Amino acid sequence: MITAWKRAAVALALVPAFAMAGSPALADPPVCTAPVPSSTQPGYTVADPDCDISGTPFVPLAGARTYTGISAGAAYRIEVPAKWNGRLVVYAHGYRGTGTTVYVDSPGLRAHYIDAGYAWAASSYATNGYDVGQGVRDSYAMIGLFRQATGRPARSVIMTGASMGGHVTAVAIETYPRAFAGAMPYCGVLGDAKLFDYFLDANVTAAALTRTPITFPLHPGPDFEDRWRASVAAMLPALGVNVGRPPELTAAGRTWSDVVERRTGGSRPGFDSAFAYWNAATSLAPLSDMPFLFGLYPGLSGGTADIAPGNVTDNRLTLYRSTDRIWPTADEWRLNASVLRVRHTAVADRGLAGIPRVDGNPRVPVLSLHDIGDLFVPFSMEQIYALRAAAHGRPFVSRAIRGVGHCDFTQAELTAGFDDLTRWVYTGHRPAGDAILNPKVVASPAFGCRFTRGAHAYFVAPACPA
């Protein structure tokens, strides 16, 4: 969803339809100019694709050539190595809030793509917000823009994206199955509207465990945000959760932690450190005065994610568990009897409107990575996709990373994932992954050790076997 909430008021801007730069030795860095009005979205502006949002000029890597421009209200970047292998990577960025300036940035594996002979392309998308459909359209358009800008078509295309960009990736390869040879979503929203169900789950169970009355208005009034603040203020001391610092959990808070663990992927190593990390983090503006998960309550937007045609969340049939026993305990039955139940009025869209559905029916190899301690876009997204892909008999490899952050991957982890995916695509050799649907494997103290490369701050668990 987000790579960061960047609301910098940096003056950036327009370039010609196809601006081309050579190596840094042959061309001076571009001068950043101010955002220009969007040609497709009233009220939007488009930032200069020749500059990062920080104001740093975008210049080619050594030996590469870049192409930048604005097309159909979206900024784009393209980079081609001197020894191009004829293959293209299209990168989809994550959620950027609801501001009205769109901007393009470069993928984290940019240097690796160029070193390996791959060209890459990325779009700002013409809109912000959780607009996956627009992300799909604009990312797919990069294939044609690449051919138009460089004068050469790509022989094959890999789709990749982080967070909301993972949702874009999963939908793109199903919407345009002949356009892509493989895909690498990471930290992705691979369960479509199930992400928003999780946000609902975390909040309604916290309320039930603390006996705090809450509502879920389909059309929240202007006073609901303040009413929600008052509800959260009542829950926090009963849970032992503190704003901006680690929790000191009460009995109710420990039960809530157990419930959240099971709603986000099951018992697994490092969860206590993940729960502490995310509850010490403050939420996104304008709700940065409360712990992270409470600012994501879907009732604040009527369950629409500010883009769907109605409430996409539903927990009428959800059985909340705090233990792994075969049969629910008396306390679990009491929790389920007292939790607020919500009925959806909209569902994940079969097309590109609202929250687009991910069928889990890719026609190409898909390799994904996810932090097992991510409680923003939780690890359960991988399991949902794995179940859907298995139902369709489609190839999917998932790798668990021992981190607590969102999209907290090392370059080594991402590089290994990309190289193994492309080897799979071009040789047919399917790479190894983790058995993420096996609860015993997930609960093992060594889960995530196989593909974790390097240290991840704040993740605390037994050390991996030597």
Image (cartoon, grey):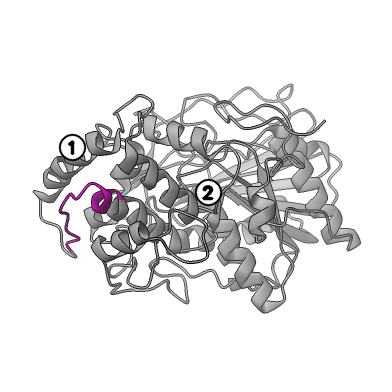
Number of other residues with Cα within 10 Å of mark 2, as a class: few under 14, some 14 to 19, many 20 or more: many
Q: If the image is split into quadrants, where does the C terminus sit?
A: top right
**Residue type pointed to by label 1:** Ala
Q: Amino acid at mark 2?
A: Ser
Q: Is residue 340 visible?
A: no
Which mark identifies residue 373?
none
Q: In the picture shown, does residue 175 fall above or below 57?
A: below
As drawn, the residue found furthest toward the front would be 330
Q: Is residue 293 visible?
A: yes
What secondary structure prevails in the magenta region? loop
Q: Is residue 205 left or right of residue 91?
A: left
> How far is mark 1 from mark 2, CA to CA?
30 Å
Query: Which range of residues does the magenta coloring cover?
Result: 206-217
Q: Which structural element holds mark 2?
A: loop
Compare residues 327 and 116 and report the one nearer the observer. Answer: 327
On the image, the x and y values in percent for residue 245 come to: 35, 24
**Is residue 330 depicted above or below 445 in this figure?**
below
What residue is disc 2 on?
Answer: 163
Compare marks 1 and 2 and give the one earlier in the sequence. Answer: 2
Element class at badge 1:
helix
Query: To which quarter of the image does residue 278 belong?
Result: top left
Report whether 26 appears left or right of 376.
Answer: right
Q: Which residue is mark 1?
A: 233
**Left or right: where 396 falls relative to 233:** right
Q: In the figure, is residue 64 to the left or right of 205?
A: right
- Rendering quarter of residue 391: bottom right
Position in image of residue 140 (x %, y %)? 59, 62
Of the two numbered discs 1 and 2 in the rendering, the one whose residue sits closer to the viewer: 1
Q: Quadrant of residue 291?
A: top left
Residue 10 position within the rendered picture, expressed as x and y whole percent measured from the top left: 38, 27
The magenta stretch spans residue 207? yes
Q: Residue at x 64, y 38 (%)?
A: 402
